[in-house]
Image: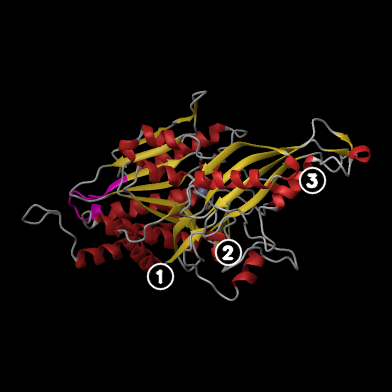
Amino acid sequence: MTDEQGTPARENTDTSSAREAGIRESLAAAFPATVADLTDLVRIPSVSWSAFDPASVAASAKAVATLFEATGVFESVEVKQAVADAASGELGQPAVLATRKARNGRPTVLLYAHHDVQPPGDVADWQSPPFEPTVRGDRLYGRGAADDKAGVVSHLAAVRALAEQYDEDGGDGLDLGLVVFIEGEEEFGSRSFADFLEQNRDALAADVIIVADSDNWNVDTPSLTISLRGNVTFRLTVSTLDHASHSGMFGGAAPDAMLAMIRLLATLHGPDGSVAVAGLTESGEQVPDSPDALADFARDAALLPGVTPIGSGPLLSRLWAKPAITVTGIDAPSVENASNTLLPKVSVRLSARIAPGQDAREALAALEAHIHAHVPFGAHVEITDTDTGQPFLVDTSGWAVTAAKQAMADGWGVEPMETGIGGSIPFIADLVRVFPDAQILVTGVEDPDTRAHSPNESLHLGVFKRAILAETLLLSLLAGSPIPE
Ligand SMILES: [Zn+2]
């Protein structure tokens, strides 16, 4: 659509409301087929971890590529791999990349999701087999039913419904640029993500990036995720003795490594469990709060009777806006193998979540400085195997954020919440680094009962329907006007 001056024009209101009605109708009619596409994908056990059969991930990539190809919307649909390990040249798991060029000044939108899944864990813990998608009540159960094959299929369904509207126009159709990037190893650390971005930088370039891999406030209220914590992890080794020695002969005078480790770890938190490491910052973002928040949290986190939450301030600020430090593993003799010896050396895996707004390397430096300053008895410390992921904070003033909030309100019939996530999606930092000007919208199909990564993972079908509608309305809004100045 072009006006007399040859500049691209915004759609008029009649066209866009007719289109909205058409979208609602075609999504409703297509919903059973959409659920069927999702269940077909869930049947493929595409676990991306190295101990699992890569043939399943390859099959899942192929199935996803076939689905996007069948939309007829894309100029190119490919299954591609990139380098996961530069030293060995080992390739990462296959991703799907589909592109369609923008025309007439319309923006390009990149739709991200991942087709790989977490391992199922102990199958006995599942009420129905993890790779046999099963509907019970309002929910579809299965590994990947939500995280993130529902993200994949919500993009697919939105693209189909959008294309259908433009086909009916009889004109030359859709001017919106589209890129679909469905990753194959998000659950295995996105090892080849950075190389994939470098290799396909031109194909992936977009004005708006929709990452459909997050949560909603509840089954009736959508969320736009505006912040994520980053992470810093490392192995910490404390040594005090050259070799083990008898705890009767030497105990009480020779410091064992376990004692030194325990005392060192105890300095990381204050008496209420708040992080006590100078230099780890808080983001100060506003969070929703309610009088029931602590009790609800105690239930959701499965705290045992009498166990109290740690930290201070509104509960959600502890999860979204402040750092956390957890010891997630320890190398020391097991209780069964314990003998009366002073341990010479103990290692732990330390996992820290860092607040939005802090640089992950700066947080690592603060942790290292704290450890060196607090190590007792002159013990030797070593920090190795460090890994960092940057946190994420959205600039909510962007035009795409405004459009996304409008589309969510229309699609769900409820204003969206702006939420944080305590977890990390480290690849988002790669996206920000490679595409600094793109606006990143983190949406999703999960809800508080989804149990992603756990047994009995499930998708709420009402959430699925509303999330698809909201995304289609967003794409339609973006297709309807040129990129704002
Ligand atoms: Zn995911």
Badge 2 density bin: few <14, some 14–19, many ≥20, Cα 10 Å: few
Callouts 3 and 1 close, C-beta under 8 Å: no
> Quick one: SS at disc 3?
helix
Q: CA distance from mark 1 to mark 2?
A: 26 Å
Query: Residue beneath label 3, please?
Result: 259
Residue type highlighted by circle 1:
Glu
- Residue sitting at 58 percent across and 48 percent down? 143
Q: Is residue 35 above or below residue 189?
A: below
Looking at the image, which is closer to me, 226 or 8?
226
Report the side of 251 relative to 456 (left or right).
Answer: right
Report the side of 337 relative to 111 (left or right).
Answer: right
Q: Where residue 33 appears, x then y in whole percent?
A: 43, 53
Verify whether residue 174 appears in magenta. yes
Q: Is residue 33 above or below residue 54?
A: below
Q: CA distance from mark 3 to mark 1?
A: 53 Å
Badge 3 density bin: few <14, some 14–19, many ≥20, Cα 10 Å: some
> Quick one: SS at disc 2?
loop
Residue extending furthest top? 88
Badge 1 density bin: few <14, some 14–19, many ≥20, Cα 10 Å: some
Query: Residue beneath label 1, please?
Result: 415
Q: Where residue 13 appears, x then y in whole percent?
A: 21, 67
Which circle marks residue 171 in the picture? none
> Quick one: SS at disc 1?
loop
Q: CA distance from mark 2 to mark 3?
A: 52 Å
Looking at the image, which is closer to me, 13 or 275?
275
Q: Is residue 129 in view from this perspective?
A: yes
Mark 2 vs 3, N-terminal side: 2
Query: Residue beneath label 2, please?
Result: 137
Residue type highlighted by circle 2:
Gly
Q: Which residues are magenta?
A: 166-178
Q: In which quadrant of the rendered image does the C terminus lie? A: bottom left
